[in-house]
Image: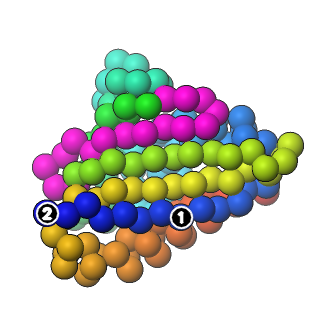
Amino acid sequence: MSNNQIAISLKINAPIQKVWNSLAQWEKQGDWMLQTKVWVTSEIAEGVGTQISAFTGVKKIGILDTMLVTTWQPPHTCDVVHTGKIIKGGGRFHLREVGVDTTIFDWSEEVIAPRLLFFLIWPALYIGVRISLARFARTFG
């Protein structure tokens, strides 16, 4: 197993707090993430200790990703650790204010997988995330 990195940055034409508030609505992430349904599985819905599940796929064919929030620093950073049987590693949402109405959204993942497997899935993962983040940015007009 090796640690594999993927990162994407995207400019969003909206204030940082507004972008953060949208990202922090876990269940609404399925509105912009391709073929994904997201739900909170813990008693708390925000902050360190929040547990989230995300199913990506069509009907019952797909993959379940379970996560635990490990860092919560509104409106800048949210880190998660993937706790499922298949997806391992960590993820980060990081927002940077570059103007009153402009935010840079840095998304990154560390995927623990055999390098060959990661090499094979990387193109689909990258394209899927890129499309999803562009859909998210469009929600701000």
| In the displayed structure image, the side of residue 54 where residue 83 appears, left or right | left
The residue closer to the viewer here, 20 or 109, is: 109
- The amino acid at mark 1 is Ile
Q: For the residue labelled by badge 2, is the local secondary structure a helix, a strand or a loop?
A: loop
The image position of residue 29, as x and y in percent, is 50, 47
Q: What segment carries the magenta color?
A: 72-87
Work out whether mark 1 precedes mark 2 in sequence or the reverse, and give the earlier one. 2
Residue at left offset 40%, top offset 24%: 48
Residue 86 belongs to magenta span: yes
Residue at left offset 78%, top offset 42%: 15
Disc 1 versus disc 2: nearer the observer: 2
The residue closer to the viewer here, 25 or 113, is: 113
Mark 2 lies on residue: 1
The residue closer to the viewer here, 41 or 81, is: 81
The residue closer to the viewer here, 129 or 55, is: 129
**Residue at the far top in the pictured view:** 43
* Dot label at residue 92: none
Residue at left offset 22%, top offset 42%: 83
Crowd around label 2: few <14 · some 14–19 · many ≥20 (10 Å): few
| In the displayed structure image, the side of residue 114 where residue 4 appears, left or right | right
Mark 1 lies on residue: 8
| In the displayed structure image, the side of residue 124 where residue 83 appears, left or right | left
- The amino acid at mark 2 is Met
Q: For the residue labelled by badge 1, is the local secondary structure a helix, a strand or a loop?
A: strand
| 3D distance between C-alphas at marks 1 and 2 | 23 Å
